[in-house]
Amino acid sequence: MSLHQRLTSNIKIRITQNANKLKFGITGVSLLIGGGVLASNKKVHADSGLEAASYPWNHTKPWQSFDHASIRRGFLVYRQVCATCHSLDRIAWRNLVDVAFTEEEIKAMAAEVEYKDGPDQEGEMFDRPGKLSDYMPRPYPNENAARFANNGAYPPDLSLVVKAREKHEDYLFALLTGYREPPAGVNLREGLHYNPYFPGGAIAMAQPLSNGQVEYDDGTGNSISQMAKDVSIFLSWASEPEHDQRKKTGIKTVILLTLMIIPTFYYKRLKWAAVKSRIIQFQNLKH
């Protein structure tokens, strides 16, 4: 073998070896990056909880309003189940009039609750029956009392809970129906319960709903999923009570603006026709 052939053979061998090293290095980097992404995804899952499925809520469509029968049932679920721990500070009794109940029904329900008022003519505070202008009663007088009654956990106010959570109603429904036995290898502290949809998987609130827990006055079935759906719709309404009126106003505005397109276009052509068709001539006034 000549010197030239030997040199050429050595160069080919080295190129092959370097290419194999480069390929191995790229594969190693890819594995590291892939492992980092998987670890990151696991961390996100642990921090945010299992992503809730998307459900076909009627009121999420631009032309649909809330299911007011479901709002009525959801309020019953909130009042009999959720209100024992969670407040609803931004909703007054009057907000429910002609939405889910008649004025007489709301007045009767409000009168069942006593509110602290005063002072009277003698400077003393007194208890009185609730009225339409009162806001929903709080289950605890302050945060410390709420934490003491719930082993240190603070039940959040539910007025804006749907807006404050990613996936909104989907998350709330998934949370209420997502309680499970902890999988093998998952150990929970005493007083915590496993729910994969809650961030971290461990939630202080026990399963709040059970089949047949709330009796509906319209005869609707009272399974866990039905009650979870109704209270999710009610709390979605509570987060924006103006929802239906806003959509009505929006639809009327779109229709009106659509009807105004033709006269506006005609008026524009009428006013600008003389300007666009005029002829400008310059005359020399010098004699």
Image (cartoon, grey):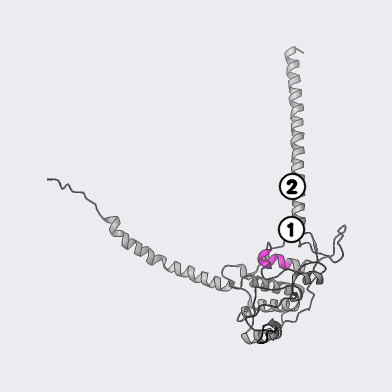
Q: Nearer the viewer, residue 141 or 208?
A: 141
What x and y, as percent, mark residue 128?
A: 69, 86
Relative to residue 42, is residue 83 depicted above or below?
below
Say which quadrant the N terminus sits in.
top right
What x and y, as percent, mark residue 161?
A: 69, 67
Q: Residue at x 24, y 52 (%)?
A: 280
What x and y, as percent, mark residue 207?
A: 80, 70
Q: Secondary structure at mark 2?
A: helix
Q: Residue at x 75, y 49 (%)?
A: 40
Identified by mark 2, the residue type is Val
Dot 1 or dot 2, earlier in sequence: 2
Say which quadrant the C terminus sits in.
top left
Q: Secondary structure at mark 1?
A: helix
The numbered mark at residue 37 is: 2
Q: Does residue 165 show up magenta in the picture?
A: yes
Q: Nearer the viewer, residue 59 or 125?
A: 125
The part of the image, by quadrant, that contains residue 169 is bottom right
Relative to residue 231, is residue 20 depicted above or below?
above
Report the magenta residues as a range: 158-173
- Name, please, the residue furthest toward the left: 287
Label 1 vs label 2, nearer the camera = 1
| Side (left or right) of 258 relative to 133 | left
What x and y, as percent, mark residue 153?
A: 79, 67
The part of the image, by quadrant, that contains residue 173 is bottom right
Relative to residue 167, is residue 140 depicted above or below?
below
Q: What whole-number distance in Å separates the C-alpha atoms at marks 1 and 2?
A: 16 Å
Q: Residues within 10 Å of mark 1 (few under 14, many from 20)?
A: some
Which residue carries the number 1 mark?
48
